[in-house]
Image (tube, rainbow, N blue to C red):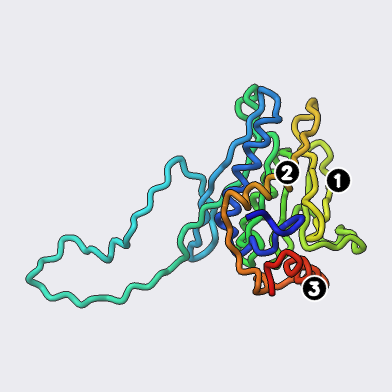
């Protein structure tokens, strides 16, 4: 089935884990077809773990997790001794794998040139914003270009510019922000409407390179078809749309006979 929306499909947030992975891979593949021969796009995985005192992001070489708690299979206890069975409770959330794209300069020892973040609901949650802002600040401090794609409705504002800088006359449900390392006092912003295709955006590289143009809408549509997403379009999306967008989406879905 083809994406019934001209741009961002608001129902995809319900399948964000799967879609985020597909879309990240699709962007990385598209970039590698466009990049100069000495640059390469790579997907970087990190694991976010909630400890008692803070949330930490870990970048492992190899991730190993035991399927069951060690307490569920005690060792070294004599079978002739009666042991009370405890109640086991979870003290932290399960580790969560996050992915982003880094463009690396192979001639500069693998130096990171540009970071591309496709935001997730966790990045915009009250706990996740602190961790995400730390990573964001590290990119900027290291003079790495930063591209942030926020297609998530709801949650707190976390993009790499003050929210007051967003133009009031161009308010939109989604935003894309580009911060260039060689222009640290500027930010390029792309308002993203539900009613229009995702924009073709400029991806900055090294100062000596021309920008790449990344066409987002064809990638989203391809991921939607490959993902074989079967959405219940008879129900409103979660989270709900603003009133005007909801009325527009209702008419669009009725015209395509996806809603009675």
Q: Residue at x 73, y 48 (%)?
A: 217
- The tag earlier along the polypeptide, 2 or 1, is 2
Q: Position of residue 32 (x, y in %)?
A: 65, 32
- On the image, numbered disc 2 is attached to which residue? 146
Left or right: where does residue 42 sit relative to residue 171?
Answer: left
- On the image, numbered disc 3 is attached to which residue? 247
Question: How far is mark 2 from mark 3, CA to CA?
Answer: 35 Å
Question: How far is mark 2 from mark 1, CA to CA?
Answer: 12 Å
Image quadrant containing the C terminus: bottom right
Image quadrant containing the N terminus: bottom right
Question: How far is mark 1 from mark 3, CA to CA?
Answer: 36 Å
- Seen from the viewer's position, the closer of residues 243 and 235 is 235
- The tag earlier along the polypeptide, 1 or 3, is 1
Q: Nearer the viewer, mark 2 or mark 3?
A: 3
For label 1, the SS is: loop
What's the mark number on residue 159? Answer: none
Q: Residue at x 62, y 46 (%)?
A: 24
- Seen from the viewer's position, the closer of residues 198 and 52 is 198
Q: Nearer the viewer, mark 1 or mark 3?
A: 3
Q: Quadrant of residue 80?
A: bottom left
Q: Quadrant of residue 131?
A: bottom right
């Amino acid at each position: 089935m083809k994406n019934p929306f001209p741009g961002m499909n608001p129902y995809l947030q319900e399948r964000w884990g799967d879609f985020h992975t597909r879309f990240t891979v699709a962007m990385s593949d598209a970039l590698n077809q466009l990049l100069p021969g000495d640059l390469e796009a790579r997907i970087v995985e990190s694991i976010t773990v909630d400890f008692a005192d803070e949330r930490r992001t870990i970048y492992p070489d190899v991730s190993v997790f035991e399927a069951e708690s060690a307490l569920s299979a005690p060792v070294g206890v004599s079978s002739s001794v009666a042991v009370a069975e405890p109640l086991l409770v979870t003290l932290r959330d399960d580790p969560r794998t996050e992915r982003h794209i880094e463009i690396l300069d192979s001639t500069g020892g693998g130096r990171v040139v540009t970071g591309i973040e496709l935001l997730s609901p966790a990045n915009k949650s009250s706990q996740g914003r602190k961790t995400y802002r730390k990573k964001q600040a590290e990119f900027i401090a290291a003079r790495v270009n930063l591209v942030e794609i926020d297609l998530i409705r709801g949650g707190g504002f976390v993009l790499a510019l003050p929210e007051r800088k967003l133009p009031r006359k161009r308010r939109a449900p989604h935003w894309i922000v580009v911060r260039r390392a060689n222009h640290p006092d500027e930010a390029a912003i792309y308002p993203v409407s539900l009613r229009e295709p995702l924009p073709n955006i400029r991806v900055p590289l090294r100062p000596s390179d021309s920008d790449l143009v990344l066409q987002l809408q064809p990638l989203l549509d391809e991921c939607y078809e490959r993902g074989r997403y079967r959405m219940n379009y008879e129900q409103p999306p979660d989270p709900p749309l603003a009133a005007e967008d909801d009325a527009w989406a209702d008419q669009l879905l009725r015209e395509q006979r996806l809603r009675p």
